[in-house]
Amino acid sequence: MGERKVLNKYYPHDFDPSKIPRRRRPKNDQIKVRMMLPMTLRCAACGEYLGRGTKFNARKEDAAGERYLGAIQVFRFYIRCSRCSAEIAFKTDPASSDYAVESGATRSPDGPWHGADEEAAAREDAGDAMAALEARARDGRREMEADAALEEARELSARRARVAPEEALESLHDRCRAAADGREAMRELERETDEVLVKSIRFRNSAGYLKRIEEEDDHEEDFVAASLASRAVASQQAQKKRRQAADRPPMVIVSKRRCATAVSEESTARDDDLANALEGAKASTGKTKESSGALQALCCSYDDSSGEES
C-alpha cells in the first residue's frame, strides 16, 4: 500500500542529492493538463457549443513576454472541439480575473458578470440615465453598509481589547454569585411558605380543632321561602271563601206539582225544606227582624196554597 501511494522510499546513507542530473526544459515547452472549461464556447468551425465545466485534456504553456504588473505570469491553453477536433486557444486574463479567447471559438455570455461593463455603457449611451443613477445609488448604499459593518467590528474589537481578562472573569464570577444568591432566596421563601401552611392545618386530635358547619345553599332557602309564601296565599284565599259563604243569605227553592197523586210527597219535601230554612235562619247571626218577618209570611202563604190544593 505504501509503495503504491509513494509514501515511503528508502534513501541510503551515502545519498547525495547534488549528484542527481537536472534536465532543462525549453521556454516554450508545453505540458499536458486535465482541466475543466471555465466558460461556454462555440466552435467557429462547426458551431458546436462547449459548455462550462466540460473536462478536456489540454496543453498548457507560458505566454512569452506577457506578464501582469510585471509579476503575474499569463498562461495559454489549447484544446480541441469534441465534434470536429478543431483547435481552440484561450489564455488567462489576470487584469479582469477572467479568461480571454484567442482563436478557434467565440465566447457565449454564460454568467451575470460577463459583459456587465459593456451593458452599462450601452445603457448610458442609449440615454437610460435613470437606471444608471439607481445603480450608482445601490452601489453607494452597499458601500455605506459595508463601512458601517466595518466600523462596528472595529468598535467591538476595541471594546474587547480594553477589557482585561481578569475583569471579565470577575464579572462572570459576580453574575454566578448573584444567580446563586437569588436561587437560595427563592428556596428559603418556599421553605417558609411550606412551614406556615403546615402550621395552619388543624387535625381532629389537636387541641384547637374547631369543626365548621357548612351553611345551607341559597337555592334551598329560596325554595323554602317560596313554599311558605304559597301556603299563606292559599290559606288567605280559603278564609276569604268561607267568609263569603257565611255572609250569603239562605235561598229556598220550591217546585209546585199539580199532580194529585204526588201531593203527599210534595208536602213532605216542603216540610223538610221549611225545617232546613228555619235551622239556617237560626244559625245565621246578625239577621234583621224584617228578614224573619218575610220568612214567616212566606211560610204562611205556602200553607194557604197547600190547603187550597187539598
Image (spheres, rainbow, N blue to C red):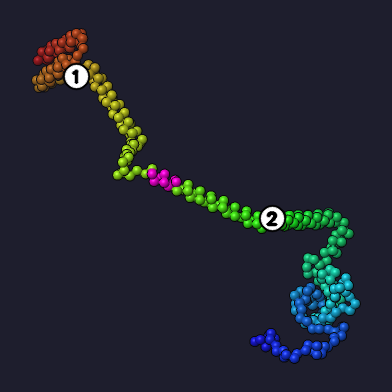
Give the numbered dot on residue 58: none
Magenta span of residues: 192-199
Question: Mark 2 vs mark 1: which is more N-terminal?
Answer: 2
Q: Is residue 247 magenta?
A: no
In the rendering, at what x and y percent does residue 292 appear?
A: 18, 10
Considering only vertical position in the picture, is 1 above or below 239?
below
Q: Name the residue rendered at 76%, 77% in the picture.
A: 36
In the image, taking residue 237 as reference, residue 259 lies left or right, namely: left
Badge number at residue 163: 2
**Mark 1 neighbour class, 10 Å CA radius: few under 14, some 14 to 19, many 20 or more:** few
Measure the C-alpha gap from mark 2 to mark 1: 128 Å
Viewed as shown, does residue 265 lie left or right of 53? left
- Residue for badge 1: 253
**Label 1: element kind:** loop
For the residue pair 153 and 264, the one nearer the viewer reads as 153
Residue type, numbered disc 1? Ile
Q: Which is in the foreground here, disc 2 or disc 1? A: 2
Instruction: Specify few, some or many for label 2: CA neighbours under 10 Å numbering under 14, 14-19, or 20 or more.
Output: few
Identity of the residue drawn at 87% across and 61% down: 121
Residue 23: percent from left, percent from top: 83, 88
Circle 2 — which element?
loop
Residue 289 image position (x, y, % from top left): 19, 8
* For residue 275, side relative to residue 35 (left or right): left
